[in-house]
Image: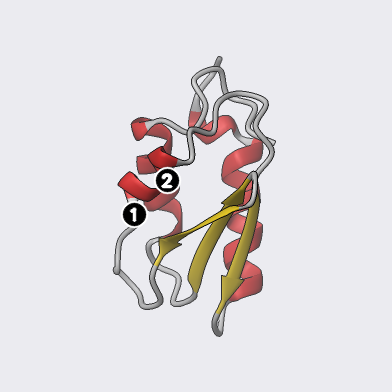
Amino acid sequence: MIRNKLGLHARAITELHDRINSFESELWIVKDGERVNAKPSGVGKGISMISLLGLAAGCGSVIEAEALGPDAEDLLVTVGAVIDDKFGENE
């Protein structure tokens, strides 16, 4: 569940990118049945800010993360930690 006050906005997505960019695995985020490719496979491939913003995941939104690749489990743990840390925001 998204717990930071502003939800999944540009700064939060940037924080997520900074924490997961070194992973090889592909990342998908699902909200209300909409599944977006948040990070293509490959180290340094970036993150799809437009796709993630399009989910309109505000505070209280329930999202699921799916990963596929050699370090998928570690990627999912990191995504969970970023979300639990409210994307580094104090509010």
Q: Secondary structure at mark 1?
A: loop
Residue behind mark 1: 48
Amino acid identity at mark 2: Leu
**Residue under the point 63% across and 47% down:** 81
- Local crowd size for mark 1, using a 10 Å CA cut-off: few (<14), some (14–19), many (≥20): some
**Residue under the point 44% across and 62% down:** 37
Q: How has the structure been colored for display?
A: secondary structure
**Residue under the point 65% across and 32% down:** 61
Quadrant in which the N terminus is drawn: top right
Residue at the limit of the structure toward the front, as seen here: 33
Q: Is residue 63 left or right of residue 69?
A: right
The percent coordinates of residue 7 (x first, y second) are: 52, 27
The percent coordinates of residue 75 (x first, y second) are: 57, 65
Quarter residue 72 falls in: bottom right
**Mark 1–mark 2 CB contact (< 8 Å):** yes
Residue at the limit of the structure toward the bottom, as seen here: 70
**Residue under the point 69% across and 38% down:** 62
The percent coordinates of residue 47 (x first, y second) are: 35, 56
Determine whether 90 is above or below 30 in the image.
above
The circle on residue 52 is: 2
Amino acid identity at mark 1: Ser
- Local crowd size for mark 2, using a 10 Å CA cut-off: few (<14), some (14–19), many (≥20): many
Determine whether 56 is above or below 22 in the image.
above
Q: Secondary structure at mark 2?
A: helix
Quadrant in which the C terminus is drawn: top right
The percent coordinates of residue 78 (x first, y second) are: 59, 56
Between 80 and 55, the one lying in front of the other is 55
